Image: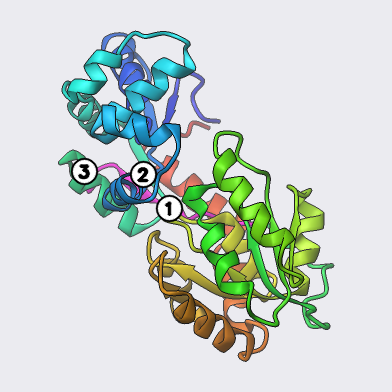
């Protein structure tokens, strides 16, 4: 069993909360430390916040100036307190050093892709050669779902409806095509303007349908009916929805803004998030014509299944000396 005094910290991109926890641990920690960074490409995040974010959060971006400043303001808002707003506006005193020291002190740092590791090392000025271990993201594929039958959905898009996920760009590209497109995902509560714009396009397009968040087994059935899964997200680490879709035989058109290319390589097509609509449509047309994704499905089911990922995680804990008999 893992020792009961092991501390597990998540998400270095939430720099306020992570930095606070890091400070407490530096003072009080007695047992082992494991970190799961979940670190998005910094340059992609900054570009999105500067160029595409709209609404009240754009004002926050202007005040906060930096990723850390934005996190301070959002943290203060979540706590219904004005503490930290002035400090955020100054953009100073980030938690980079605290986070770097925590990463170096951890017995184990678990990352999902080599690109994520390189990003962590560049952002925080550390090396994870000693304590970093790759444990890939993984999915469960329901073997009872038929994937070789008729696929009556041309394009499936899965994810919360929000600016970061960029579904509006996909809807605008699909609205003038003959393809049947289905969007699945809850509307983000803080992206009401974006949701309204998306809703107008979908409701005004006979070929597009929106469905709210679905249970996993219902979503799996949709994967089995879809020819192509499309993602235009501005930043990701490794998307579970994209892995799942390919695991059920969908062709994938994704973006260069994450690390899933390390997982799927030639079994998917990768574009910039805001590629021109014609470029996106051409990529989807090529994917539709390719038939079901036999190679990608085999890769996901044999290399990125839960059992394989679990073995990698156990080995990482063993290498770090964190398992006891």
Q: Residue 161 vs residue 24: left or right?
A: right
Q: Residue 76 vs residue 126: left or right?
A: right
Element on which disc 3 rests: helix
Mark 2 vs 1, N-terminal side: 2
Q: Residue at x 51, y 20 (%)?
A: 4
Q: Give the spatial CA distance, label 2 vs label 3.
A: 10 Å
Give the number of marks. Answer: 3
Instruction: Give residue 77's position: percent from left, percent from top.
Output: 44, 17
Q: Give the spatial CA distance, label 3 vs label 1.
A: 15 Å
- Give the magenta part as a residue range: 129-139
Foreground of the two, 312 or 224: 224
Was residue 136 drawn as part of the magenta stretch in this picture? yes
Was residue 43 drawn as part of the magenta stretch in this picture? no
- Which residue is label 3 attached to? 123
Instruction: Give residue 119's position: percent from left, percent from top.
Output: 26, 51
Q: Residue at x 78, y 80 (%)?
A: 151
Query: In the image, is residue 180 above or below residue 305?
Result: below
Element on which disc 1 rests: loop
Viewer can see residue 160: no
* Quarter of the figure that contains the N terminus: top right
Q: Residue at x 38, y 19 (%)?
A: 31
Query: In the image, is residue 158 above or below residue 283?
Result: above
Foreground of the two, 322 or 172: 172
- Which residue is label 2 attached to? 39
Asked if disc 2 and disc 1 are in contact, CB closer than 8 Å, the reply is yes
- Which residue is label 1 attached to? 237
Asked if disc 3 and disc 1 are in contact, CB closer than 8 Å, the reply is no
Asked if disc 2 and disc 3 are in contact, CB closer than 8 Å, the reply is yes
Element on which disc 2 rests: loop
Mark 3 vs 1, N-terminal side: 3
Q: Residue 255 vs residue 171: left or right?
A: left
């Amino acid at each position: 069993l893992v020792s009961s005094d092991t501390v597990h910290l998540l998400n270095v991109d939430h720099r306020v909360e992570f930095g606070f926890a890091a400070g407490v641990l530096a003072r009080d920690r007695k047992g082992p430390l494991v970190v799961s960074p979940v670190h998005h490409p910094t340059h992609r995040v900054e570009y999105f916040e500067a160029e595409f974010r709209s609404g009240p959060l754009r004002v926050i971006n202007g005040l906060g100036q930096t990723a850390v400043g934005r996190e301070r303001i959002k943290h203060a808002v979540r706590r219904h307190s004005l503490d930290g707003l002035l400090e955020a506006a100054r953009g100073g005193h980030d938690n980079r050093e605290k986070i770097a020291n925590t990463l170096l002190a951890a017995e184990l740092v678990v990352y999902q892709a080599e690109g994520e590791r390189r990003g962590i090392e560049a952002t925080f000025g550390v090396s994870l050669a000693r304590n970093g271990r790759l444990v890939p993201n993984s999915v469960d594929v329901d073997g009872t779902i038929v994937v070789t039958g008729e696929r009556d959905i041309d394009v499936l898009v899965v994810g919360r409806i929000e600016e970061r996920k960029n579904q509006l760009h996909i809807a605008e590209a699909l609205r003038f095509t003959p393809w049947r497109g289905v969007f699945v995902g809850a509307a983000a509560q803080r992206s009401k303007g974006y949701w309204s714009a998306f809703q107008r396009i979908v409701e005004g397009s006979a070929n597009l349908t929106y469905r709210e968040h679905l249970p996993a087994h219902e979503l799996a059935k949709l994967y089995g009916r879809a020819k192509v899964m499309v993602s235009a997200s501005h930043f990701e680490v490794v998307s579970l929805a994209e892995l799942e879709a390919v695991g059920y035989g969908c062709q994938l058109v994704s973006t260069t803004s994450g690390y899933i290319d390390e997982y799927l390589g030639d079994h998917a097509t990768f574009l910039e998030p805001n590629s021109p609509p014609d470029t996106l449509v051409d990529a989807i047309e090529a994917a539709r014509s390719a038939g079901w994704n036999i190679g990608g499905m085999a890769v996901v089911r044999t290399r990125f299944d839960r059992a394989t990922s679990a073995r990698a995680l156990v080995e990482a804990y063993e290498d770090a000396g964190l398992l006891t008999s």
